[in-house]
Image (cartoon, rainbow, N blue to C red):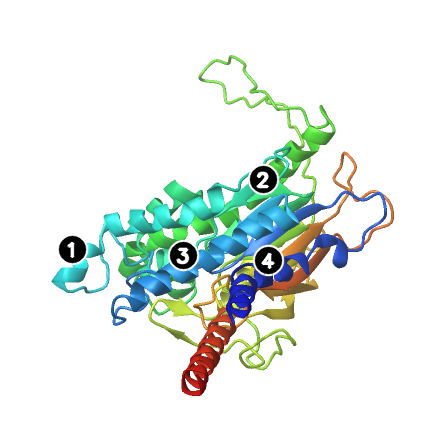
Amino acid sequence: LTLIWLYVIWKGERGVFKDHISDCHWDKWEEWPHDAAPHHLVFVADPQLVDPHTYPGRPWPLSSLTESYTDMYMSRNFRLINEKLDPDSIVFLGDLFDGGREWATERARNLNSTERHQWKMRQWNSEYDRFTPNVTTQHYAVGGTKARTVKMNVPGNHDLGIGAKVQVTVRDRFETRFGEANSVYVIGNHTFVSLDTPSLAAYDEFVQGGSVTEERRQQYRDIWKPADEFLDTLEVTGPKAVRNTLNHFYPGTYPSRGHYHTVHDPKDKVDDRPKEKVEKPRLPIILLSHIPFFRNPDVDCGKWRERGKAIPLSAGYQYQNTLTPALSNMIAKKVSRIGDIEHIFSGDDHDYCDISHRFNIGRWSENSQKESVVMRAVREITVKSFSWAMGVRKPGFLLLSLWNPVDEKGKTIGTPLPTIKSQLCLLPDQLSIFINYARLLAFTIIVLLVRAVVI
């Protein structure tokens, strides 16, 4: 009986976790040319660190045990991802803390006096101190030969709120610790565009909605303005990020531009600056959003989804399950100005969803002086939650393999092939592990009772 207990505990606390991660190894599913050197990336969505806000009515010690076991579950899996899979990059897709938006500096939801005393900035710092050791202590590869890129700057509605309920001070705090909520960078010869869609939801509400007074529109403008301006300047920042990357591989291809200086009489209206044409090289685009893009409510998410066949189109306090059609199309159109969107990755739903969108990314024609209709199919994967406390029995994460050899102009070398391959990796069912312990405990009690009666 003792040996059975030792085996079951070892299997439930160690063996099953190693088996699940090992089954996802890159060699078991990615297929590239024999000489390929792909960039390996892991997407982690909705860790949503359990805190006093998650289950406010749950008594001690159950509340503390829930926090401890969810932390241990994620920490154990994150460590094994680094050890067994050794990815080059790890990107989080938002909702890092469950109550991040509630530990507010102003305009928080109504709290009683006890909660207000406990749930201040000190509480947020406490959650940050719980969360970061799990992801920062493994920044380096197992062999210590390369630095691992970890991106945690995609904000979720549990981090900031959503729409008009986003608090700018809360967002500032998030960006101070995790990086700019809107960013563009290059990984594995792909341009990653990371968007603060919870804040952009306010643009949809106050600008595209139409039935809002100008006074209210100006009152909430600071919520969506940074994300909207980021999209409007993407035609400058996107190609710049690509040029910097290509200069790393092909030094001198895109020399830095100096500042032109000349002297004129102030009365002369002369502009003799040389008209330089700035090259805008392109790479395939991967778009990151915490909130999934709009789709018809009956679109099937695929066989790996646990709860129903589709993401339900609903909204409520501080959440909406998808972006609106207008906002989805606006984002796709603006991002497409710097290249073709090859893939969208999102979170929020906690369950898996793999669908294909069709966007009209119409382009302006100088000849006809009007916009042409250009339809493009874009695949979106909504990544499972990394936590076992978020309503799915089998949490998970997504593996991404990127292989896109390019020349100095950013063009793919050789025969164009798909440059992105992905694989869902499922994690152990923690509830089943607990059930196995309970069954073994019941069996043990029965054996001991029988033994006591017989002897």
Towards the viewer: 273 or 230: 230
Which numbered circle lies on residue 333? 4
Looking at the picture, which amino acid does disc 3 mark? Ser
- The residue tagged 3 is 199
| 4 or 1: tag closer to the N-terminus | 1
Residue at 75 percent of width and 58 percent of height: 28
Query: Nearer the viewer's eye, disc 4 or disc 3?
Result: 3
User: Which residue is label 1 attached to?
Assistant: 117
Q: Earlier in the sequence, mark 4 or mark 3?
A: 3
Q: Amino acid at mark 2?
A: Arg
The alpha-carbon separation of the residues under discs 1 and 3 comes to: 28 Å
Residue positioned 34% across, 56% down in the render: 100
- Is residue 233 among what the camera can see? no
Gap between marks 3 and 2 measured at Cα: 29 Å
Q: Position of residue 120 (x, y in %)?
A: 22, 52
Residue assigned mark 2: 148
